[in-house]
Amino acid sequence: MTVPSVTTTLKKYKGKWGHPEVKHLLKRTLFGAKKEDIDYFASKSLRHTIQQLLNQEEPVPAPPVNNYNDDKYTDEDVQPGLTWTTAAQYSGMNGFRRRNSFKAWWLGCMLNQQRTLREKMVLFWHNHFATEAMVIENPTMVYKHNVLLRQYALGNFKTMVRAVTIDAAMLKYLNGNANTKKAPDENYGRELQELFTVGKGPGSHYTESDVKAAACILTGFRIDNKSLPGIHGTFDAGRHDESDKQFSEFYNNQVIKGRKGKEGEMELDELLDLIFQQPEVARFVCRKLYRYFVYHQIDEGTEKTIIEPLANIFRQSNYEIKPVLEILFTSRHFYDVGNRGSIIKSPIDFTVGLCREYSVPFPAEDSYVEQYSFWLNIQQTASQMQQNIGDPPNVAGWPAYYQEPMYDKSWISSDTLPKRTAFTDRMMTNGFARNGKKILIDPLLYTKQLSAPGDPNKLIDELAALLYAVELPAEEKQYMKTGILLQGLPGMASDHYWTDAWQKLHDKPDDAANTKNVTSKLKNLLKYMMSLPQYQLM
């Protein structure tokens, strides 16, 4: 199989704007590409599509609620169905349950995402500014950190870095809370440069002395936890190092003058100004965005004709995120056939994408206990496949987004691949059940939305076009027809046996044997289609 060549140019895409192009864009920018969303955006122009995807006016989702009371524990502070994010205290017992409630809620935000990029960007920034809920412990801080990522997801990166720096969850996670003039802690000062801004790329030459200087500037920031719901980062001048801070040649040997009292907090802004003068900041972030949305490999050509121009746009727009994404998603390079189906789905893309593409119905808000339980089922399934939202492996995030040379290939292993197939099989057969409610795929309902489900050839073509980001070989489609759809029918090679069976669904809906037969064949077909390597790609 020859791999199509890729055009490395950010020139505006002026090619065909149809279902394949829309599907490619949506599989990358949303969790899964639903048929109704593909149809919707295919009727718009590329410009209108990108404008809508980059819309920031989306309302903030209602906060997570107490779904966790049971016969073993009752949260005395929070009524069932009300939010725990405003509770006055937390304990080890309710802390664990509230963190699970948070993870279920976040998964629900992804499942119920609008036609915008926000949810995909919240996950991007969670991986970029990685924190672990298990380390932070306090569920209110964990939730507020997520709200912060949500607020800045498509906003200004520099403003976001400042907000993250003094965020209570980050102060706890990277020891900023313990960073004082008597005992400077270098943890955040190091990661601020190595993982959050200038990175470890070829043009990043900050030194150990820069880490120490940054740590001294950041002394004095601590968590104000007098009241739990109002918990936040604050500046304590008494803990701040007031001496001058000398930086290396990488930062033009600049000195940040020590400030006294409340003015010590202003040193943080000077530090960020210093860091953001480095061209490497924009390059580093643009490389990460590229690997997240386009492809893991960045060769010399891509660096020169894609990353460098994007980084220039990022700097010229004063580190606004939207202009960079707008140029990328309207470029010829993004829509190149060689870039389609080139990323292995992350576990979240795989699980949430499946639920969204098949329009799996979840219980409504009035059944919040079951609703959260099913959301948590999906979250924990993704976690078993190595992507536990809220708790990435460490401060660097998930290896699939940065670890050479494997990158996204590391999502697939002898451990995780069988789990993926087990999940697709389960969602097609028994699903998940609780208190008389179930979540699973309805193959009949899904198939009925297609243009010609009674024609086995068109049915398979259309399913392949929806489920896969790459073309399926003709012999594979032939096997699906004769080996699955027509299998066991008299005169198996005749298409009309499937056509007749499908027509009978409409004409004689009470014919239980026919309905069972058609449903069973659709289940087998879809299970098989989702077991193929092509289904792992987006």
Image: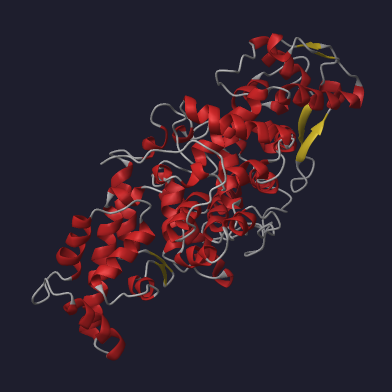
Residue 130 visible, this orientation: no
User: So how many labels did they put on this image?
Assistant: 0
Question: Residue reaching furthest front?
Answer: 14
Q: Residue at x 46, y 69 (%)?
A: 361
State whether residue 122 is above or below residue 423. above
Q: How is the image coloured?
A: secondary structure
Given residues 201 and 355, the one toward you in this image is 201
Q: Residue at x 75, y 9 (%)?
A: 253
**Residue 151, can we see it?**
yes
Q: Is residue 401 left or right of residue 492?
A: right
Looking at the image, which residue is at 15% across and 64% down? Answer: 483
Question: In the image, 415: left or right of 126?
Answer: left
Residue 509 or 502: which is nearer the viewer? 502
Q: Relative to residue 81, is residue 232 drawn left or right? A: right
Instruction: Using the rendered view, name the quadrant where residue 189 is placed.
Output: top right
- Seen from the viewer's position, the closer of residues 477 and 111 is 477
Percent x, y of residue 231: 75, 42
Q: Position of residue 223 (x, y in %)?
A: 75, 34
Q: Quadrant of residue 453?
A: bottom left
Q: Give me the residue at 52% from left, 34% from top.
A: 397
How far across and down, in percent of the image, does residue 379 sit?
Answer: 47, 51
